[in-house]
Amino acid sequence: KNLDILLKPLKEKIQTFEKSVDEKYSNEAKERHALKSEIERLISLNDRMATETSSLTQALRGDSKVQGDWGELVLERILEASGLREGFEYSIQKSHNNDEGDRFRPDIIINLPDNKHIIVDSKVSIKAYDIYRLSETEESKTKAINEHLKSIEKHIDDLGDKHYSKLKGVNSPELVFMFIPIEPAYLLAMHSDAELSTRAWKKGVAIVTATTLLTSLKTVASIWRLEKQNRNALEIAQEGAKLYDKFVGFLEDFEKIGNTLEQGQKQYSMAMGKLKDGPGNVFRKMELLRELGASPNKKIKPELLE
């Protein structure tokens, strides 16, 4: 019995320790299983992303329609990041006719104050650039660069020939932004042909990338904020002028009320004087009737008789 009493606390401690070890092992097993499942999910997601990226790359290489849609999508994301609002500061693919009746649909029309506009068209030149990027020989790289420059030159000529500045309902300067969504492709072209942007400018085309376009759009957003502030200041000045005119009119009416009250006071004093002033005044005669025996229910105030 004594040994049992002595060993019982130790037995309880050992049981508690065993329970703790079992729980810890069980929790670690669950965590390892959860971690394994999460790793498997990430691997699956990575494989799917790799497949989708490969599919997108193949589509961009071979399908010009997909290339154009992708470029327009990138352009829309830049517009959203600039702080401009669709339907207010810019519109997407809105159709306009020129004087000859030909219909054109620019990718983006950016609205400016005073009913002015800027037109942005996305042009993707990726096929030759991709060939250049994957080329291993200088000869193949040179050939790819030349093809890349020809592609960009063609886009410049196409935009220059559209004469967007002559579209009805569009008050645009004779300049259109040609957006190249792949900045390394743009840098390659500029490095290979230093006069490319100058020739494009002469044809009414300004070549922009995501960086330069976003900077320009941020400037447009700042112009709109300043325009709204100026409009608010003008409205405040106009409302202030109206309020001032109202206040002047109120003072004039209030002055008329004062004059009317003053005239009324004079008329009251004159009428009261006729009733109570002088010998034989009306007040005295009315009081005399009472003194002679009339029995009225009310009596004239003494201060009026005085």
Image (cartoon, rainbow, N blue to C red):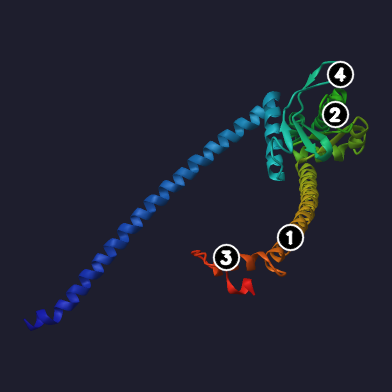
Distance from the alpha carbon under mark 3 to that under mark 2: 115 Å
| Viewer-side label of 2, 1 | 1
Q: Identify which residue is drawn at 77% across, 36% down.
A: 110
Distance from the alpha carbon under mark 4 to that under mark 1: 79 Å
The answer to whether one can see residue 271 in this image is: yes
Q: Which mark is residue 99?
A: 4
Q: Identify which residue is drawn at 72% across, 32% down.
A: 91
Front residue of this view, candidates 251 and 293: 293
Count how many numbered circles sit on residues in the image.
Answer: 4
Q: Are marks 2 and 4 in contact (CB under 8 Å)?
A: no
Distance from the alpha carbon under mark 1 to that under mark 3: 28 Å
Residue extending farthest to the top is 101
- Left or right, residue 263 beside residue 2: right
Answer above or below: position of 203 versus 217: above
Callout 3, which amino acid? Leu
Q: Which mark is residue 267?
A: 1
Distance from the alpha carbon under mark 2 to that under mark 1: 91 Å
Mark 1 vs 3, N-terminal side: 1
Mark 2, secondary structure of its residue: helix
Mark 2 vs 1, N-terminal side: 2
The answer to whether one can see residue 63 in this image is: no
Callout 1, which amino acid? Gln
User: Picture coordinates of residue 147 (x, y %)?
Assistant: 82, 28
Distance from the alpha carbon under mark 2 to that under mark 4: 22 Å
Splitting the image into 4 quarters, where does residue 53 fall? top right
Answer above or below: position of 172 versus 191: above
Front residue of this view, candidates 263 and 257: 263
Q: Label 2, on which residue? A: 156
Callout 2, which amino acid? Ile
Mark 3, secondary structure of its residue: helix
Distance from the alpha carbon under mark 4 to that under mark 3: 103 Å
Q: Which mark is residue 289?
A: 3
